[in-house]
Amino acid sequence: MQTNALGVPAWPIHGPEEAEAVQRVLASRTWWRGSGSECDLFEAEFAKFLGLRHARLTSSGSGALEIALQLGDISPGDEVLVPACTFIATASAVLRMGACPIPVDVEAETLCIDPEDLERKCTPRARAVIPVHMAGQGCEMDAIMAIARRHGLFVIEDAAHAHGARWRGSPLGGFGDVAIFSFQNGKLMTAGEGGAVVTNRDDLAERSFALHSCGRPRGDTDYRHLEIAGNWRAPELVAAVLRAQLARLPGQLALREKRAPVFDGLLARNPRLRPLKSKPDTTLHSHYMAMAWVDADEPGCIDTADLSMQLRRQGIPAFKCFPPVHHTRMFEPAQLRFAALRSDFKFPDYRSLTTPVSEAAGKRVLWFHHSVLLADEAVLEKLATEVSRSLGNFVPTKNKEMVHV
């Protein structure tokens, strides 16, 4: 396994299996899913791995989210509840449908959507909820499904971080109406880009084929475009690489599950670091990120942007947490006017919406790429020591900004 100077495995990990897969498709000259078999085979294998009935391979996780929203018949002006702390695609897909994302705060221990705030944010216009299994930690799906039933919400699980993860023994991605996965370059299995829509519902699986293929049903040769849809098909080359990646995933999941508590314990030796908790209901945690609060109980003490930049310069793949989605420029009025497809619809004043845990996490949570958890324990010891040393070299200034000394 190739590593950097500190012993952190290089990502993505690949081998002769991926090379053979690419050569196999190149030689076949069937690079498009309409004439090849790799996409069909991957969909069957991925669904079986997850323990679900259906999987639809797409060209990206963002595309999978848009398809999922279409499967839920989300219309302009509908409200879709999303966690405030998530990658922007969870919210931007809603905007691209002309619908209204409603940011919901997250739990401090897990950064998963807070069921209590979800209940508070539901209105008669709410039509769907997208719980995000942050870093592979399962959301409180029993509570979320109960809320969804009370309010008639379509449930889209965002499992972009949760390949193979389980909650109370059942696969994440199998609780809601549909779920999405991502195979972008940093994900637990990757072909550079790619995504999937998964479901146990036969009707949604059938419709998803047309929605990912310009509205055309499977096997169509008469140009029957059944509904408005884009082209979210993935090529056969992507599917072939993903089949090889899927074969190596179980071993990597087992190693991350073993290493994660070790790394958390090493980080926790520093009283300024508080690793996020793994709830026992998540019976298999995929550990897409190792995450920790920095100076969680000392307001104004540190912003992890500078700290993570310093750590990356040292070869440690560390990053700050996502900012609240509604604090990005995407949610400024000048941008939102392009998303309002219904003339009588007005977006809320997003700057006035408070999500205190998400706002704190955007500044105070530090996360490490999952490749760290494939390293030897001696490497983890070295990394934790270096993180503590670097943290010790940061001090607050009077105006609460940070300088490195």
Image: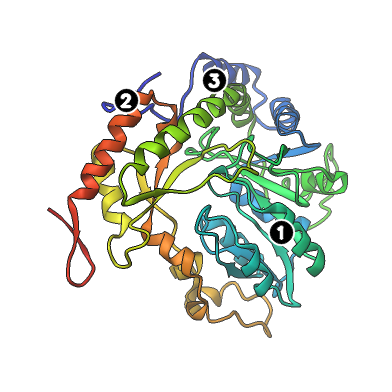
Nearer the viewer's eye, disc 2 or disc 3?
A: 2
Residue at 24 percent across and 41 percent down: it is 313
Identify the element where label 3 is drawn: helix
Q: Amino acid at mark 1?
A: Ile
Per the image, the residue denoted by label 1 is 144
Task: First in sequence, mark 2 or 1: give its number.
Answer: 2
Residue at 28 percent across and 42 percent down: it is 387
Q: In the rendered structure, are the residues bearing label 3 and label 1 in contact, judged by CB atoms less than 8 Å apart? A: no
Q: Is residue 255 above or below residue 213?
A: above
Residues under labels 3 and 1: Cα distance?
A: 38 Å
Identify the element where label 2 is drawn: loop
**In the rendered view, does 295 fall on the left or right side of 243?**
left
Q: Residues within 10 Å of mark 1 (few under 14, many from 20)?
A: many
| Residue 295 on image: x %, y % | 33, 57
| Residue 296 on image: x %, y % | 37, 59
Which image quarter: residue 240?
top right
Task: First in sequence, mark 3 or 1: give its number.
Answer: 3
**In the rendered view, does 184 fall on the left or right side of 172?**
left
Q: In the rendered structure, are the residues bearing label 2 and label 1 in contact, judged by CB atoms less than 8 Å apart? A: no
Residues under labels 2 and 3: Cα distance?
A: 23 Å
Q: Amino acid at mark 2?
A: Gly
Please state, as top left, top right, bottom left or bottom right, where the N terminus lies in the image: top left
Residue 10: image tag = none
Residues under labels 2 and 1: Cα distance?
A: 40 Å
Residue 7: image tag = 2
Per the image, the residue denoted by label 3 is 18
Of the pair 56 and 382, the residue shown nearer to us: 382
